[in-house]
Image (tube, rainbow, N blue to C red):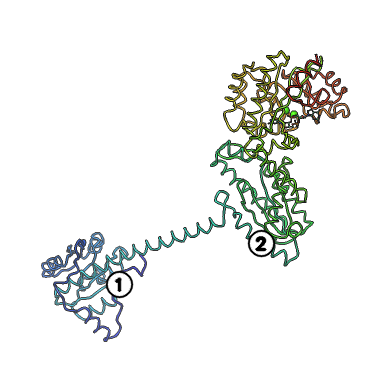
Amino acid sequence: MSDSTQPKRATTIPDSLDLTRSIKRLSVPFDSGTFPLSEGSHQRSTVLICRDNDAKKWGPRWLKQAGLKTTIISAVRTAHDEAAAAKPDVIIVEAGILDHAGTPLFAILNKSPDIRCPIIVLCSGSKDMYSALDANVYDVIRKPLEWQLLSHRARQAAESQVNAASLESAQTSLTEAVQIADEARQRLRSRESFEPVTGLPNKTKFIDLLTRGMMAVDRDKNTLAVLVVGFNRFRLVVEAMGQDRANLVLGEIGNIVSQCLQDAESAQQQTTGLRTAAASSIELAKFGLMFTCSESDEAITHLQQLVVEKLSHPVQVAGQTVHLSACVGVALYPQDASDVDQLLQRADNAMRDAQSRGGGFRFYCEETDAAAARKLKLENMLYEALGRDELSVSYQPISNTESGRITGAEALLRWHQADGTCISPGEFVPIAEDAGLMTRIGEFVLDQACRQLEIWQEDDVPIEHMCVNVSKAQLVGGGFVRTVANLLDKYKIDPGCLELELSERGVLSGRFDVIDQLHELKKLGVTLSIDDFGTGDSAIAYLRDLPVDTLKIDRSYVSGLTRNSKDAALIAAMIALSQKLDLKVIAEGVETRQQVNMLKKLGCSEFQGFYVSASVPPEEFPKLVIKSI
Ligand code: C2E
Ligand code: CA
Ligand code: CA
């Protein structure tokens, strides 16, 4: 209990005038009818420490009338402990009771930390009174005792004790209320300025920081770099993990981004002194960084590389590994923009441009504006394309290297816009994945391809297998295995004729979260192939760990086959490896007779490419097959 909450005690009165006044106060006439016993008030208690038998006899009666229950203590030796144990609301003690060392008991009680109630001292003369007042006791009453007055004063003292306690508790509650209000205000303020998932400044705050940074740049004649960090296919992380876990991933990314800025900052400080820097969370899965530098500063490139590099490591969250592909866009003030909105927009455009190139970082230039605008336009048009039947599937033949016969087909998505423009799937598939449209589109392709296979088989077109590309979006959404099973059933297709292509950079990046589904697909009897083999970074591990049947050697190796001995050696090694693992090999992007001959020599069983034909509409495909027989 703080001093301010202790029951008020009479202060030491040094001169006679004050003493007289004090005594006067103590002798206020007693009105027996006005005891402050309100209805429902609790019974108070007092400890009366006295030797006087009269006091022992009359005291409890009078005190009872004043609503006080009395405990009498007469043994000096145990008086302190008994009084403390009784926890009374007031103690009444005779001044003349001394301990073995001659110290008045009231002084001992008054100083004791175990006794927190007011003490009234019964005094026999002025000497007692002076010494009691000097000890700063609550009240003194002079003998001969007037019991009515004493019990009234005792009751008042007891009430003051209770009031002090409730005052203390009221003050504690008030302090707590003030603290809660302060915390609430702080939370509100931080909600206004910070993004709750990452704890980083939010967009409003970032714009404020940018505005101030730009003013400083105007004054100091240097440069403000703004970086926007985004991710390819973050939507898939949310779909696969759920929003709560995806938030944990975002929190971890926020930490990494801030750490990158700190690292870059401390590296800079060693050479060029303190700069302004801030990291912020500006949208879901989009982060902003700003710092001042000189225009040709290598720190900008360094920071971009650092962010891309750090974020290319898998992030571990709640026992799951998440593989991310970060893209960074940069715009500079005053070189690239004249105001905050434009600066942020242009850094964002540069980021989108990096995104459509598959990752990495990109500085703002006019081209990036155009690329970002096109990406946005395509995204909007894709929604309409679905409704307008602008999407279709065409088929590229796959041939046997030895016989030259067409034995299979790869289904490839085509987007013919109403004005006749054709958009490449290489461009719009990633956009559809980002926009969450690829599950629907992928299902459409699969349905078309299965339907087509049924038609050709009914028409006796001798096609042994149909290859269909699978997007990661189809696998993370769940339900893909069921979709495939339903389509096999619907079109009465031999499952062994359907080959699902999983691209190394797409489906198999961050790969093993799909492995269970791949095993389930295998159980259906369909075959699985690794598309673009050799373009990812763990090609050999796929062969060991995934239940695949076929390798599709990427076009980039095939194009150098007849010109570059290293490519030839690599393809030879891939084929030898596949033979050992009992896998089929299909070479992609075969454009010349020499390439076909070379592949035949190396033992590659099948190939596809412009040498035989580009993809064609379904009605033209049987003609190609017949020609090849
Ligand atoms: P991909 O799966 O590697 O498909 C082969 C691509 O190479 C096709 O491009 C094809 O037209 C092209 N190509 C075939 N032979 C040659 C050749 O001899 N020379 C050259 N230069 N190119 C050749 P396309 O149709 O533009 O598709 C590009 C990519 O888009 C595909 O690469 C695939 O990753 C994706 N894609 C296409 N259709 C689908 C689909 O239905 N679903 C999914 N998820 N992705 C698809
Ligand atoms: Ca493919
Ligand atoms: Ca391919």
* Residue in the picture at 14% in, 75% down: 146
Q: In the orientation shown, which residue stands out farthest toward the bottom?
A: 17
Residue ID at (63%, 28%): 443
Q: Looking at numbered disc 2 in the image, what kind of residue is underneath it?
A: Thr
Disc 2 from disc 1: Cα separation: 58 Å
**Position above or below: 425 against 129:** above
Circle 1 crowding by C-alpha within 10 Å: few under 14, some 14–19, many from 20: some
What residue is disc 2 on? 211
Left/right placement of residue 262 relative to residue 160 reads right
Residue at left 27%, top 73%? 137
Q: Position of residue 86 (x, y in %)?
A: 23, 60
Q: Quadrant of the C terminus?
A: top right
Query: Could you tell me which secondary element the residue under label 2 belongs to?
Result: helix
Is residue 31 something one can see in this rendering? yes
Residue 83 placement: quadrant: bottom left
Q: Is residue 153 above or below residue 409?
A: below
Judge from the rendering whether residue 550 lies leftward or rightward of residue 133; answer left or right: right
Which corner quadrant of the image does residue 292 belong to?
A: bottom right
Q: Earlier in the sequence, mark 2 or mark 1?
A: 1
- Please state which of the two labelled residues, at mark 2 or mark 1, is closer to the viewer: 2
326 relative to 297, above or below: above
Query: Split into 4 quadrants, where in the image is the N terminus?
Result: bottom left
Measuring from the top left, give residue 320's x and y in whole percent. 58, 36
Q: Which residue is mark 1?
A: 8
Amino acid on which the number 1 mark rests in the picture: Lys
429 or 189: which is nearer to us? 429
Q: Residue at x 88, y 23 (%)?
A: 594
